[in-house]
Image (tube, coloured by chain):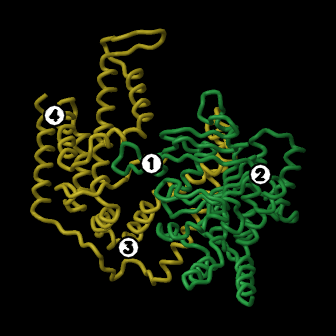
Amino acid sequence: MLKDITIGQYFPGDSIIHRLDARFKIIFSILAAAMLFTAQNFIGLGIAAVFIVMCYAVSGIRFRMILKSLKPIIPLLIFTGILNLFFIKGEEVLAEWWIFKIYADGARIAAFMIIRIITLITGMSLLTYTSSPIMLTDAIEALLAPLKKLRFPVHELAMMMMIALRFIPLLIEETDKIMMAQKARGANLDAKGLIKKAKALIPILIPLFISAFKRANELAMAMECRCYRGGEGRTRLKKLTCSAIDFLALGLILCVFGLIIVNNFVF
Amino acid sequence: MTAIETKNLSYRYGIGTPFEIKAVDDVNLTIEKGDFIGIIGHTGSGKSTLMQHLNGLLKPTDGEIIINERSIWSKDVDIRSIRFEVGLVFQYSEHQLFEETVFKDIAFGPKNIGLSEEEITVRVTRAAQAMGVHDSWLERSPFDLSGGQKRRVALAGVIAMEPQILVLDEPAAGLDPYGRDKVLSQIKKYHDEYKTTILLVSHSMEDIVKYADKVIVMNKGGVFLYEKTDKVFSHADEIVEIGLDVPQITRLARLLKAQGIDIGDDVYTVERAKERVLEVLKNEKK
């Protein structure tokens, strides 16, 4: 079911990770991504993976959620795997069939890439699992604040993101309803063949677009009615605050980063 | 003849998540062919979920659904064919409109059945007529119509499949009083003309008793009451207890009864109340 999509879903909780300042959490995520791309061998990746798994354990998010967040990128994983497996040439041949040759190097790099993507997605998901969309957009706005000097519409961007995030579950629900209604009229959504599949989508996409535009219109009207005038002089219900624990976490993540860099030189 | 039968039907949402809810709980129902049944219950009483089982959109967690003597989830039944036997109209059905013209939209269902062009035209015209959709609208875009008109087009879209059973989930929700009466009376007229089995879900007890022969009251995922409309309000106390309303005129009759003037438990229309009150007055004069 569409309702099972979890990317960008927030699981309320009260763990240390939930309580970290969202601004720091975004920086941590960027650092984690950098970490994964710095790691040049399996040991480095292993260190990062263990670190991420530990974060999950601390956050109280169930491990099953990792699998769920990985589900949508399975095609990407397969694609990357196959590409690396067949097109990277090396010396040692592992297997040979018809015109395909699999080299040891190819197999290694394919595995490496797949693990890297998995850890990357898992790490990024933790950010959205443990911070509410409002906290996230506030944090992004705060982090991008220096750009205001360059007349970059930071607040507007954050607002647009927040609205988009807010509307995802609504639109999913709506899609579900429209799909049901068209199925009830005998629409064959499991049709085979590309053209037939695309055609089967029309009865769903058109009503969805119409209702999305209608909603946007209504929201804009409601915002106008409440005299929304952008970010100038706006105060917040929940202020972002950072404490010692955020800096401690920063220290920890920098240590892990350091470890991975050292590991690159040693092995 | 039995049109719909459910045996120990249960359905749970979100199995395996912390949000697991039992939406329908052990429902056993038998609905006869040609009946006009009203279904009422609170938000979350499981009526919409139950309705979505009847044409196989949801698969029951437990139990069985038998439509026209066929268990719909047995292996030899194509579930799509059930959708043509049981027409389901969702709440705010105008959201399902998508074609360029009203005609094409109503024709969507019949086309999916795989009917010939001529047969489609016949059915579209018939359905449009049954729902009071004007001939002059047929070549217009459905998005140019008013809310009530759109609703009738959406209803016609399902009726055009000519299902033997028609399930309507709040067909009048969100319409103004005129649109409401128009939609509901068209449905009633359609029922009288074609003898289709109709299940009408509504929040309004007044609407239900006005049109339905039998009433199903749902509460907490189960069937709380299943009675002929005449007999429903002999259970008025229980109905009020689970937080549902009885029609205004029934409330008045109950107040009168409490005062010692009995005009009967089956008073739910103003006309009947008038008759009974006149009767009581006549008897008093003697």
Q: Are marks 4 and 2 in contact (CB under 8 Å)?
A: no
Q: CA distance from mark 1 to mark 4?
A: 49 Å
- Residue beneath disc 2: B196
The dot on residue A264 is 4
- Residue beneath disc 3: A151
Residue type for callout 4: Asn
Residue type for callout 2: Thr
Q: Position of residue B144 (x, y in %)?
A: 75, 68
Mark 1 packing: few (<14 Cα in 10 Å), some, or many (20+)?
some
Q: Chain of mark 2?
A: B
Residue type for callout 3: Arg
- Residue beneath disc 1: B13
Q: Are marks 1 and 4 in contact (CB under 8 Å)?
A: no
Mark 3 packing: few (<14 Cα in 10 Å), some, or many (20+)?
few
Which mark lies nearer to you, 4 or 2?
2
Q: Position of residue B285 (x, y in %)?
A: 74, 90
Q: Are marks 2 and 1 on the same chain?
A: yes
Instruction: Specify the colour of chain B.
Output: green
Seen in the picture, residue A267 relative to B212 is either above or below; the reply is: above
